[in-house]
Amino acid sequence: MKIVFISDTHSRHYDVDIPNGDMLIHAGDLSSRGKPEEITDFLNWFSNQPHKYKIFIAGNHDFFFEKEHEDEIKNIIPKNVIYLNDSGIEIEDIKIWGSPVQPEFYNWAFNRKRGKEIKKHWDLIPLDTDILITHGPPLNILDKTVRGDIVGCEDLLNAVNKIKPKIHVFGHIHEDYGVLKKNDTTFINASILNERYRNTNDPIIYNYE
């Protein structure tokens, strides 16, 4: 299974050279401000990608997915696209879970207070998850801002250490794009845009055995 990971395209998806593969995963911030027309444009583009499986979560810029009713969201998701929101799916024996929440970050979408409030979401992640998709990073893993601040979620790190997914992909912190393998988990910050919102980073390919 050849998996292509992207994140934080912020309505600039047309500028991204997407490699071929079996599965395409977007880890949130697909829009600039989460306006309906931005979401529709992205979904049309995403659904037309050649990958057999196309999966995405929302991010803190994607207000549409937080404000709209669940039925309204379902109505605009193309049939060949999978949207995860504190939910999961199994594809060819690979168990995938996705969540858009991240620790409070200004007045953006899917903010949760650190501690008890955000931990409720991580407690939902099944213990047998193979690929975990979150918008924000865990603490001390590809989560350093351009100012040197460490902003990842400690409770998410605790959950990942317990679950030990094969892959944990996220974005949110554009400037710490990259791949880090730690213990049994490969961590991927798949942010396409850098901290200046310029398209500088390539999609990340992972050959899942």
Image (spheres, rainbow, N blue to C red):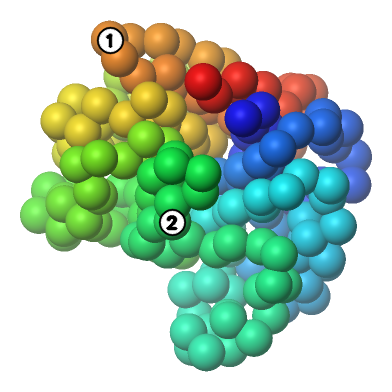
Tags 1 and 2 touching, CB below 8 Å: no
Kindly identify which residue carries mark 2: 89
- Toward which corner of the image does residue 100 lie, by quadrant? bottom left
Residue 75 screen position, x and y as percent: 64, 86
* Category of crowding for the residue at label 2, using alpha-carbon neighbours closer than 10 angstroms: few (below 14), some (14–19), many (at least 20): some
The local secondary structure at tag 1 comes to: loop
Q: CA distance from mark 1 to mark 2?
A: 25 Å
Q: Residue at x 19, y 26 (%)?
A: 161
Q: Is residue 81 left or right of residue 126?
A: right
Vertical arrangement, residue 25 with respect to residue 59, above or below: above
Vertical arrangement, residue 19 with respect to residue 180, above or below: below
Vertical arrangement, residue 171 with respect to residue 79, above or below: above
Residue 115 screen position, x and y as percent: 12, 48
| Closer-to-camera residue (109/100) | 100
Vertical arrangement, residue 59 with respect to residue 78, above or below: above
Q: Is residue 143 left or right of residue 92?
A: left
Mark with earlier residue (1, 2): 2
Q: Is residue 86 left or right of residue 23?
A: left
Image quadrant holding the N terminus, namely top right
Q: Is residue 38 visible?
A: no
Indicate which label's residue lies in the foreground, 1 or 2: 2
Q: Is residue 68 left or right of residue 127?
A: right
Q: Residue at x 61, y 43 (%)?
A: 25
Q: Number of marks in the image?
A: 2
Residue 37 screen position, x and y as percent: 79, 75
Q: Is residue 21 visible?
A: yes
Q: Residue at x 57, y 16 (%)?
A: 178
* Category of crowding for the residue at label 1, using alpha-carbon neighbours closer than 10 angstroms: few (below 14), some (14–19), many (at least 20): few
Residue 97 screen position, x and y as percent: 39, 49
Kindly identify which residue carries mark 1: 183
Amino acid under label 2? Answer: Ile
In the picture as drawn, the residue positioned furthest to the left comes out as 116
